């Protein structure tokens, strides 16, 4: 027990360089504050070595960052973007039904058109096109004129990617699924030839399949 105690005492002495209480008069300063005096203790070696190590690490980091270009944020960003792009491609390959629109066609059955109509009414389409498709801010959807092209592919793409830059409809591909956009495009095409209450003047060009 005494050996362990002696070892621990020696270890603390080497780690702190603290003076024994009976020898504190050797490091006692002349300052006196209302009877309180100050000891001129040296910094503990463990603290000094920790400080020296951080200084060395900072110098190494400085050279690595400035001279060897090991921590280039632009390169890190480009690498992260590359990894993200690869992950997106993997996700697309695993979920082709969410991204492949080559096989999508206009749906004409009553159930699908009813679903499309419900989407048209609830996804703020009526704000710009009115409930009957006659158009207000947005164009008339019931005539044969189209600004960005008619037909299923063009209408689907316009819904997905948005209208004209700066003044057209927002892109809905991040809000609506591919199936919902298909239903919506199908319903919009079904409005052609109907008679809205207050039809807006024709915009765009006549579209023929």
Image: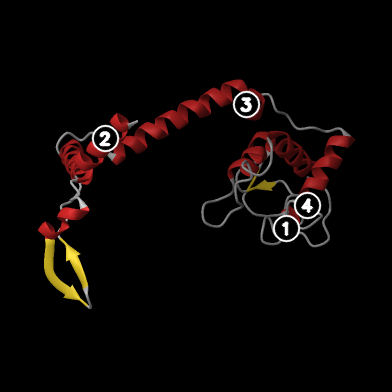
In-image side of 172 versus 115 (left or right)? left
Give neighbour class at mark 1: few <14, some 14-19, many 20+ (Cα, 10 Å): many
Q: N-terminal of the two: label 2 or label 1?
A: 2
Which numbered mark, 4 or 1, is in the foreground of this view?
A: 4
Residue 197, position as x, y percentages in the image: 83, 61
Q: State the residue lying farthest toward the bottom.
A: 34
Q: Are marks 4 and 2 in contact (CB under 8 Å)?
A: no
The residue sitting at 22% across, 37% down in the picture is: 10
- Residue ranking furthest to the top: 93
Tag 4 and tag 1, C-beta contact below 8 Å: no
Q: Secondary structure at mark 3?
A: loop
Would residue 143 be found to the left or right of residue 195 on screen? left
Q: Nearer the viewer, residue 106 or 73?
A: 73
Say which residue appears at 46% left-offset and 30% top-offset. 85
Q: Which mark is residue 122?
A: 4
In terms of secondary structure, where does tag 1 sit?
A: loop
Of helix, strand and loop, which one carries label 2? helix
| Among numbered discs 2 and 3, the one appearing first in the sequence | 2
User: Can see residue 191?
Assistant: no
User: Residue 100: which numbered mark, if any?
Assistant: 3
Q: Are marks 2 and 1 in contact (CB under 8 Å)?
A: no
- The label number, if any, that marks residue 135 in the structure image: 1
Q: Which residue is mark 2?
A: 6
Cα gap from disc 4 to disc 1, whole angstroms: 16 Å
Residue 99: image location, x then y, percent = 61, 29
Q: Look at the image and tell me whether residue 144 can be seen.
A: yes
CA–CA distance in space, label 4 to label 3: 25 Å
């Amino acid at each position: 027990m005494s050996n362990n105690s002696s070892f621990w005492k020696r270890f603390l002495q080497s780690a702190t360089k603290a003076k024994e209480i009976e020898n504190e008069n050797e490091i006692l300063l002349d300052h006196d504050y209302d009877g309180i005096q100050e000891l001129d203790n040296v910094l503990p070696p463990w603290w000094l070595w920790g400080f020296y190590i951080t200084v060395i690490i900072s110098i190494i980091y400085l050279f690595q960052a400035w001279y060897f270009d090991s921590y280039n944020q632009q390169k890190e960003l480009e690498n992260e973007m590359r990894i993200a792009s690869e992950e997106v491609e993997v996700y697309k390959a695993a979920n082709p039904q969410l991204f492949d629109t080559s096989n999508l066609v206009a749906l004409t059955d009553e159930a699908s058109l009813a679903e499309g109509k419900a989407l048209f009414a609830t996804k703020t389409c009526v704000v710009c096109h009115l409930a009957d498709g006659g158009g207000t801010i947005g164009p008339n959807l019931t005539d044969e004129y189209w600004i960005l092209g008619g037909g299923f592919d063009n209408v689907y793409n316009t819904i997905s990617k948005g209208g004209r830059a700066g003044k057209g409809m927002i892109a809905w591909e991040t809000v609506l699924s591919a199936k919902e956009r298909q239903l919506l495009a199908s319903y919009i095409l079904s409005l052609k030839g109907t008679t809205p209450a207050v039809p807006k003047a024709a915009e765009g060009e006549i579209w023929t399949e």
